[in-house]
């Protein structure tokens, strides 16, 4: 069976079918069809003929050629499904060519033949998929590296124009520079769960959510605890981002031109540190949102003295003062947070006043206490 088949004529029919039935091949240059696709189609058809005595298992040389051909087609932008369809079309033409012989064949011969067809198709398709995956991983790695180099150039003040050209990305007039702190997902500490996988999945979801804001124009460098992103938008939808992470997400943002990104990146990291350490909570923050704490916590000659104002206060009293300030000076809310009676809160606040000379219940002393607490938090 197939011994007398005119392979060149069969290849002509396969190529004609590829051009007519598969748009991807129909739009290929003639030189690509004749110089690359045709020789591979002929090798594949001859390889199929030669595989029949071996149950359809193709020679290793043909498998390697199919794999290399898939890599080459992938580099030309041919989708994998079109490559697989091309091989399937070739097998269909073989079956059509043999129709008269197959109609006269015994059942056992038919079973053996179609078993060989399936085996050949399976092995060759695996080789194609392997080659295409190698190409895609290589391309993805190169693309990711180029995007990472562009992000680094923008953040560090390098040659962003050249890096953008190599990454195939047009620089935006403005970026929203975002520094992120990502809390742990419950799965990262759940017994029996792969914690590393849970963390990676969280990062992947956050990255995809950020990518949805601008696709190719979004640049990110993220870890399970946070990172930095440059976005072509005016603001970040925090609720969507937190939902994607399944965890608390705190973000500091600043708008900047490409040349001003290094300064904005430093500023957003500082804003983020202030927001996290002063326990502002999950949300999106700009400098105006933490202006007082930011100014109070910049290192100056007064910083050490401010922090020292609370040195006489022990840990229980510090926790009480923290809670009292965080709950908006509400004694009952403070008591609930600490799990104590409101009278205990009153007693502790009075002790703080005696030890420091600063009374938490007196409005005139509150700015100094807030400043001292902010400085201590930033230094912790």
Image: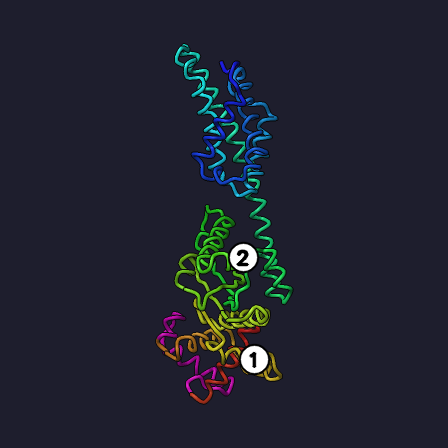
The disc label shown at residue 82, or none: none
Please check the rendered image and state whether residue 369 is part of the magenta-colored stretch, yes or no.
Answer: no
Q: Residue at x 45, y 24 (%)?
A: 93
Q: Residue at x 38, y 72 (%)?
A: 340
Please check the rendered image and state whether residue 354 is part of the magenta-colored stretch, yes or no.
Answer: yes
Tell whether label 2 touches label 1 (CB within 8 Å). no
Highlighted range, magenta: 333-362
Is 295 or 287 nearer to us in this picture? 287
Does residue 23 appear left or right of residue 61 in this picture?
left
Is 195 drawn above or below residue 342 in the view shown? above
**Mark closer to the observer (1, 2):** 2
Separation of residues labelled 1 and 2 (CA atoms): 32 Å
Residue 138 x/y as whole percent = 59, 45
Answer with mark 1 or mark 2, whichever residue precedes in sequence.
2
Residue 352 x/y as whole percent = 47, 82
Residue 43 x/y as whole percent = 57, 25
| Residue at the extreme right of the image, as rendered | 158
Q: Residue at x 47, y 51 (%)?
A: 201
Label 1 sits on residue = 307
Label 2 sits on residue = 223
Is 347 drawn above or below residue 14 in the view shown? below
Q: Main secondary structure of the magenta part?
A: helix
Q: Secondary structure at mark 2?
A: strand
């Amino acid at each position: 069976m197939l011994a007398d088949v005119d392979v060149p004529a069969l290849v002509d029919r396969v190529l004609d079918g590829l051009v007519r039935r598969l748009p991807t091949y129909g739009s290929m240059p003639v030189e690509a069809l004749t110089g690359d696709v045709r020789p591979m189609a002929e090798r594949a058809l001859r390889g199929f003929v030669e595989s029949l005595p071996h149950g359809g298992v193709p020679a290793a040389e043909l498998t390697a050629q199919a794999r290399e051909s898939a890599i080459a087609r992938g580099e030309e932008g041919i989708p994998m499904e079109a490559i697989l369809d091309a091989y399937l079309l070739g097998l269909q033409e073989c079956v059509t060519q043999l129709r008269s012989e197959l109609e006269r064949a015994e059942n056992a011969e038919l079973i053996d033949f179609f078993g060989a067809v399936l085996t050949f198709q399976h092995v060759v398709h695996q080789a194609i998929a392997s080659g295409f995956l190698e190409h895609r991983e290589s391309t993805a790695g190169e693309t990711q590296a180029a995007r990472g180099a562009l992000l680094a150039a923008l953040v560090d003040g390098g040659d962003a124009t050249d890096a953008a050209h190599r990454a195939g990305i047009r620089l935006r007039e403005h970026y929203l520079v975002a520094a992120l702190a990502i809390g742990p997902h419950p799965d990262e500490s759940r017994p029996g769960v792969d914690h590393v996988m849970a963390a990676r999945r969280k990062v992947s979801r956050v990255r995809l959510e950020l990518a949805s804001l601008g696709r190719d124009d979004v640049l990110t460098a993220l870890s399970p605890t946070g990172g930095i992103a440059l976005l072509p938008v005016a603001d970040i939808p925090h609720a969507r981002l937190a939902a994607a992470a399944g965890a608390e997400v705190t973000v500091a943002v600043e708008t900047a031109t490409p040349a001003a990104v290094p300064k904005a990146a430093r500023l957003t990291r500082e804003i983020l540190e202030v927001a996290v350490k002063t326990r502002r909570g999950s949300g999106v923050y700009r400098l105006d949102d933490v202006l007082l704490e930011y100014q109070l916590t910049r290192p100056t000659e007064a910083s050490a003295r401010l922090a020292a104002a609370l040195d006489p206060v022990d840990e229980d009293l510090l926790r009480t003062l923290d809670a009292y300030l965080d709950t908006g000076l509400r004694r009952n809310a403070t008591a609930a947070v600490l799990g104590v009676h409101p009278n205990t809160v009153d007693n502790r606040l009075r002790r703080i006043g005696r030890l420091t000379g600063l009374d938490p219940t007196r409005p005139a002393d509150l700015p100094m206490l807030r400043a001292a607490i902010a400085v201590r938090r930033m230094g912790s």
